[in-house]
Image (tube, rainbow, N blue to C red):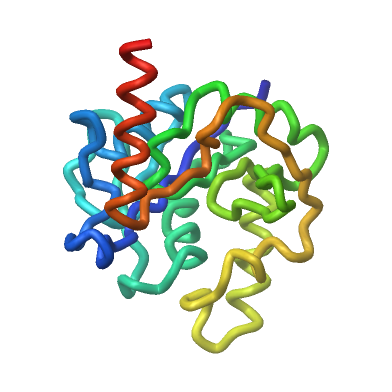
Amino acid sequence: MARFAAVVLAGGSARRMGGSDKPSVLVAGISMRDRVLSAVAAAEPRVVVGGRSDVPDGVRWTREEPPGGGPVAALAAGLATVDPGAEEVVVVAGDLPMLTTAAVHDLREALSTADGSLFVDRDGRRQLLCGVWRTAALRRRLTEMAAAQPGGVAGASMRALIEPLDVVDVSWAGEDPPPWFDCDTDDDLRKVREWLTAKTTG
């Protein structure tokens, strides 16, 4: 397989969980962000965009300017730190505690000659922040979007970014919960903690 990088978008807030930095919330003693970083441990480099800057050794940290520009602006900031030798890049949210190395491998296997691969849920909805991309394809689209909008890519949607690209939809064949399960509420966190406890005790 080609060398790959990883960009973890960790700027999400936890308004519905009473906090300001959702990816830093602990799940079974490990932050959601660090669980995601563990799932992409083989990537070089691994880049965290936004959130807390105290990243593990060997991980790069950056943020979009100005902060709060949305996922496409954050992605652009992360890609700016990735060297050209990384032909593929994993792009994931920082609040996916069920993401695994095996799930990342499935996405990379499915990529083939396409521009990107994304997990889709049972209803066919693409999980826009759980995918693998050709680095060159993303850079090309970011350049196109920045040139077409007076304000650059700030505020742009991931859907608009990938719309013209050749994307492979990947169904999840594993057990629930799926790797794209994100934690937006205290109830989501409770479910994840129960799942992880069942895994470690089962």
Image spot of residue 106 (x, y percent): 66, 27
For the N terminus, the quadrant is top right
- Relative horizontal placement of residue 110, taking residue 105 as reference (left or right): right
Of 29 and 71, which appears nearest the observer?
Answer: 29
Place of residue 73 in the rendered image (x, y in percent of width and height, measured from the top left): 46, 67
Estimate the x, y position of residue 84 in percent, counting from the top left.
57, 41
Residue 148 point in image, percent of width and height: 65, 82
Q: Which of the 4 image quarters holds residue 29?
A: top left
Please state which of residues 81 and 23 is positioned toward the viewer in this rendering: 23
Residue at image position (58%, 26%) is 175
Task: Return the residue nearer the eye: 37 or 124.
Answer: 124
**The furthest residue to the top:** 202
Residue plotted at (64% across, 55% down): 138
Whether residue 166 is situated above or below residue 101 in the rendered picture = below
Quadrant in which the C terminus appears: top left
Figure label count: 0
In which quarter of the view is residue 128 placed?
bottom right
Residue in the picture at 64% in, 36% down: 87
Q: Is residue 87 left or right of residue 43?
A: right
The picture quadrant where one finds residue 164 is: bottom right
